[in-house]
């Protein structure tokens, strides 16, 4: 159930509801920001309270006591304050520029370490195979997005992930005099 429906179910409506929702929505936006996310379309209706917690605001067959509405209101607000909620509408979920820069820096450093250690023998995951061609070690495996094989020089399985086509972001193409188009790619890595 979304947070608006939860408040309406306990009898909070209109202006009172709007006053409550503003700080709750800001809190959720701030929580997402701390995790490196921003949602282009933040709405209170995207804040979901779990069924087990909604059940705590409903007591079937019991008469409402004076002050119980206020307790339920406080309970719902406390859930958001504690982070006990979910957010839906992920199609507009993006990483913040600060987080992207942080990840790029870490990935660049890790990639250089992995390149340095590319010839050290490592245990391969089941989806990768090793092979030597003219004395040069390679690892290779199936690429789901293209159906082809990807070959990477060395024995470091972490390097395989750096070169997967789905990990690369398309950037604008350049048109040459002969009307040929060349696509430029830049690496996009993510740690979650």
Image: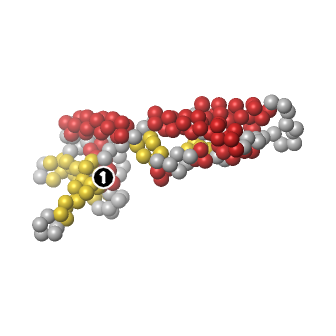
Q: Position of residue 176 (x, y in %)?
A: 14, 64
Q: Position of residue 3 (x, y in %)?
A: 65, 43
* Residue most extreme to the bottom: 179
Query: Residue shown at 69%/47% (left/top)?
Result: 5
Q: Quadrant of residue 182?
A: bottom left
Identify the residue position indicated by label 1 in the image.
169
Image-based side of 149 in relation to 5, left or right: left
Report the quarter where the C terminus lies: top left
Q: Residue at x 22, y 50 (%)?
A: 152
For mark 1, give the secondary structure. Answer: strand
Q: Position of residue 57 (x, y in %)?
A: 75, 38
Q: Is residue 178 above or below residue 70?
A: below
Expressed as whole percent of the image width and height from the top left, the position of residue 133 reads 15, 53
Residue at 74% over, 37% down? 56
In the picture provided, is 119 more to the left or to the right than 70? left
Give 52 or 27, whichever is nearer the viewer: 27
């Amino acid at each position: 159930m979304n947070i608006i429906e939860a408040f309406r179910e306990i009898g909070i409506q209109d202006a009172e509801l709007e006053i409550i929702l503003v700080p709750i929505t800001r809190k959720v936006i701030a929580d997402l920001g701390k995790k490196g996310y921003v949602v282009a379309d933040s709405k209170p209706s995207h804040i979901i309270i779990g069924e087990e917690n909604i059940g705590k605001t409903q007591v079937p067959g019991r008469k409402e006591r004076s002050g119980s509405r206020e307790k339920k209101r406080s309970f719902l607000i406390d859930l958001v304050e504690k982070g006990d909620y979910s957010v839906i509408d992920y199609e507009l979920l993006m990483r913040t520029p600060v987080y992207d820069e942080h990840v790029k820096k870490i990935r660049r450093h890790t990639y250089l370490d992995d390149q340095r250690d590319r010839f050290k023998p490592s245990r391969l995951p089941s989806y990768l195979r090793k092979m030597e061609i003219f004395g040069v070690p390679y690892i290779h495996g199936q690429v789901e997005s293209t159906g082809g094989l990807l070959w990477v020089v060395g024995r470091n399985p972490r390097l395989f992930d750096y070169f997967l086509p789905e990990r690369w972001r398309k950037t604008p193409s350049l048109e040459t005099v002969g009307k040929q188009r060349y696509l430029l790619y830049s690496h996009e890595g993510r740690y979650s």
